[in-house]
């Protein structure tokens, strides 16, 4: 078999018939990695023994596209599951234990301490579960499948670059989609954004709380977080509100279903004039712009969401995720007052 012969030449496991195409594709990934500056020895060690992970391919194929129509879920059940007393208490414990570190990150980045905590809590429940899929195997399998080949081939090459930087091979574990560590960074995000905050010369987002928190803060800074601006606030909407006049005419090229649920932008002063009332906090100062989101429909708690909410969406483009981050951050912050 040609694939088996080539595989043995580069230290690959012998390929069975159904794995031949994957083994040949690994050699293509090897060439791409070396062309991108990865040392040949690193590329060979990284692809040695890899086999196709069909489970990962199946999980990816089961993901709906962002433009697929379907019923709109309610946020309330998601909120109950993701912002419970245990998660809030654990977040508060992390907040207290790392208070000095959080304060320094907020001073440097402008990202509130509680937001950083909430990202960590939402991504991995404060590091209690970071995933056990082999990243190189997952990324190679997803690239080979071809549904999002350019994305995953690039992430595979970046994972090899992590090895070249000295990241131990055993650290390259995470989600089936290739995210790793406490903040669940893809390899490309690790290379761009991971920070060494404890001074040991390594950006360790797996076991170092200071590195994890500094890396999350830097991510938000690079994504455009605006210092001093809230992520949003819960509001009550009057029955008289004319939603038709507030419908957004903008079409987002990214995550269109997520942004389609938002109204047009208005200033907080304009929302106030329309009879919208904050539920649990005062109106923010300044000329802050916000969109309206009613995740559970009319007559239920709604939210005015600022540009900083869009930064949370940059981390994970899901309204439920971004809302849960903001609300968990608020709960952790209130717990300490």
Image (cartoon, helix red, strand yellow):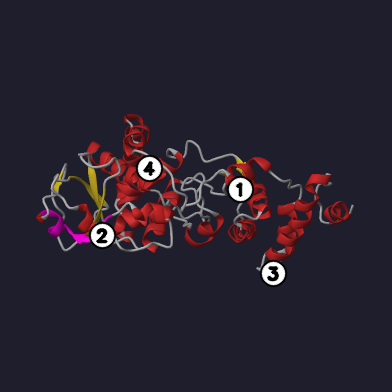
Magenta highlight range? 263-272
Report crowding for label 2: few under 14, some 14 to 19, many 20 or more residues within 10 A (C-alpha): some
Would residue 100 be visible to someone looking at this image? Answer: no
How far apart, in angstroms, are the residues tagged by discs 2 and 1?
42 Å
Residue 243 relative to residue 223: left or right: left
Task: Indicate yes or no whether the magenta region holds residue 266.
Answer: yes
Please tell me the numbered disc located at residue 35: 3
Camera-side residue: 248 or 3? 248
How far apart, in angstroms, are the residues tagged by discs 1 and 4?
35 Å
| Disc on the earlier residue, 2 or 4 | 4
How far apart, in angstroms, are the residues tagged by discs 3 and 4?
45 Å
Report crowding for label 3: few under 14, some 14 to 19, many 20 or more residues within 10 A (C-alpha): few
| Disc on the earlier residue, 2 or 1 | 1
Q: Which residue is mark 4?
A: 72
Q: Which residue is mark 1?
A: 172
Q: Position of residue 140 (x, y in %)?
A: 67, 52
Please tell me the numbered disc located at residue 264: 2
**Quarter where residue 310 is shown:** bottom left
**Quarter where residue 58 is shown:** top right
Please tell me the numbered disc located at residue 247: none
Residue 103 relative to residue 316: left or right: left
Instruction: Evaluate if marks 3 and 2 touch, with contact meaning CB atoms under 8 Å apart.
Output: no
| Mark 3: secondary structure | helix
The single residue placed furthest to the front in the displayed view is: 244
| Disc on the earlier residue, 3 or 1 | 3
Q: Position of residue 128 (x, y in %)?
A: 47, 36
How far apart, in angstroms, are the residues tagged by discs 3 and 2?
45 Å
């Amino acid at each position: 078999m040609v694939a088996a012969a080539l595989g043995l030449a580069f230290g690959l496991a012998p390929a069975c018939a159904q794995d031949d195409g994957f083994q040949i594709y690994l050699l293509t990934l090897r060439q791409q990695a070396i062309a991108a500056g990865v040392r040949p020895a690193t590329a060979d060690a990284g692809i040695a023994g890899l086999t196709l992970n069909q489970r990962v391919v199946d999980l990816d194929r089961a993901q709906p596209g962002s433009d697929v129509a379907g019923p709109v879920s309610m946020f309330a059940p998601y909120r109950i599951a993701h912002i419970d007393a245990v998660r809030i208490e654990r977040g508060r414990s992390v907040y207290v234990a790392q208070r000095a570190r959080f304060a320094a990150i907020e001073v440097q980045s402008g990202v509130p301490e509680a937001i950083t905590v909430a990202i960590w809590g939402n991504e991995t429940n404060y590091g209690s579960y970071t995933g056990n899929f082999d990243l190189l195997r997952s990324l190679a399998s997803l690239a080979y499948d071809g549904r999002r080949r350019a994305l995953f081939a690039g992430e595979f090459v970046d994972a090899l670059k992590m090895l070249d930087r000295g990241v131990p091979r055993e650290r390259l574990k995470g989600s089936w989609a290739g995210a790793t560590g406490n903040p669940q960074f893809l390899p490309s995000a690790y290379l761009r954004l991971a920070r060494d905050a404890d001074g040991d010369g390594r950006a360790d987002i797996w076991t170092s709380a200071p590195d994890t928190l500094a890396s999350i803060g830097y991510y938000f800074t690079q994504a455009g977080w605006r210092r001093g601006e809230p992520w949003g606030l819960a509001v009550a909407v009057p029955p008289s509100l004319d939603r038709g006049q507030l419908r957004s005419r903008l079409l987002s090229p990214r995550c269109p279903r997520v942004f389609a649920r938002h109204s047009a932008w208005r200033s907080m002063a304009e929302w106030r004039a329309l009879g919208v009332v904050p539920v649990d906090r005062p109106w923010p100062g300044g000329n802050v712009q916000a969109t309206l989101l009613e995740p559970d429909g009319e007559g239920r708690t709604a939210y005015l969401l600022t540009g900083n909410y869009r930064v949370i969406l940059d981390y994970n483009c899901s309204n439920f995720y971004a809302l849960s981050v903001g609300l968990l951050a608020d709960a952790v912050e209130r717990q300490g007052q």
